[in-house]
Image (spheres, coloured by chain):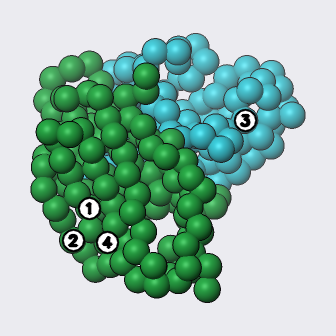
Amino acid sequence: SAVISQKPSRDICQRGTSLTIQCQVDSQVTMMFWYRQQPGQSLTLIATANQGSEATYESGFVIDKFPISRPNLTFSTLTVSNMSPEDSSIYLCSVRQGISTEAFFGQGTRLTVV
Amino acid sequence: QKEVEQDPGPLSVPEGAIVSLNCTYSNSAFQYFMWYRQYSRKGPELLMYTYSSGNKEDGRFTAQVDKSSKYISLFIRDSQPSDSATYLCAMSAGAGGTSYGKLTFGQGTILTVHP
């Protein structure tokens, strides 16, 4: 299984600011995803991070709010822009080597917006 | 109707009990099924991964998939207090489609195993 490191593990941010979350994998992976887990809720996919091209966003999520980069096969960033208290969630990076393989998750970034 | 339905519980059982966790789904394209355990303030940890219908056993855990009924289960035998966590079912479709590799999750079941 892949080892996934997310930074920061938690942060408290002022509304209107932006936070960039990093996801580093210890091996090259085909697929990288970003999920959000709101308090007491399950996980919702924000977007698929595509290496060398623009991310693919799910309905309800837009690039201006959640810009994503993936410069190579082991690293991705998610930025939460112009934050509001409603963005307070856990943000999780996930990887898969293919659609027929398991999906693994990082430990998450717990974001609180005040 | 949600694509994946999971009873949120909470579920409380005595140590040593057999626990049954279940999910139903509506999307017939789902082919890959996973169960995750999530402790408080941690990321989801993969417990079981199965493809299509059938059973898979790993230690105290057994995963069952019945595609004809669109129903999956996770059984935990000899449950321990350390099994207390939230359990999430997740599933994904095969090749094709716009959300390649995406997981769709159930709501999660909160399990407490008391000594």
User: Hey, what amino acid is under mark 3?
Assistant: Ser
Q: Position of residue B84 (x, y in %)?
A: 56, 70
Residue type at mark 1?
A: Ala
Q: Given contact means CB atoms under 8 Å apart, are the residues at marks 1 and 2 in contact?
A: yes
State left or right for residue A26 relative to residue A12: left
Residue at 37% x, 45% y is B23
Residue on which disc 4 sits? B61
Q: Cβ–Cβ below 8 Å for labels 4 and 2?
A: yes
Q: Chain of mark 4?
A: B
The structure residue drawn at horizontal position 32% and vertical position 35%, both measured from the top left corner, is B25
Q: Residue at x 73, y 20 (%)?
A: A82
Q: CA distance from mark 1 to mark 2?
A: 6 Å
Neighbour tally class for label 3: few under 14, some 14-19, many 20 plus, Cα within 10 Å: many
Residues flagged by tags 4 and 2 on a common chain: yes
Q: Position of residue B104 (x, y in %)?
A: 37, 35
According to the picture, the residue beneath numbered tag 1 turns out to be B63
Disc assigned to residue B57: 2
Q: Quadrant of residue B59?
A: bottom left
Q: Are marks 1 and 4 in contact (CB under 8 Å)?
A: yes
CA gap, disc 3 to disc 4? 34 Å
Which mark, by number, is residue A88?
A: 3
On-image quarter of the N terminus of chain A? bottom left
Q: Residue at x 13, y 30 (%)?
A: B95
Query: Is disc 1 in contact with disc 3, using a CB cutoff of under 8 Å?
Result: no
Q: CA distance from mark 2 to mark 3?
A: 37 Å
- The numbered mark, 1 or 2, whose residue comes first in the sequence reads 2
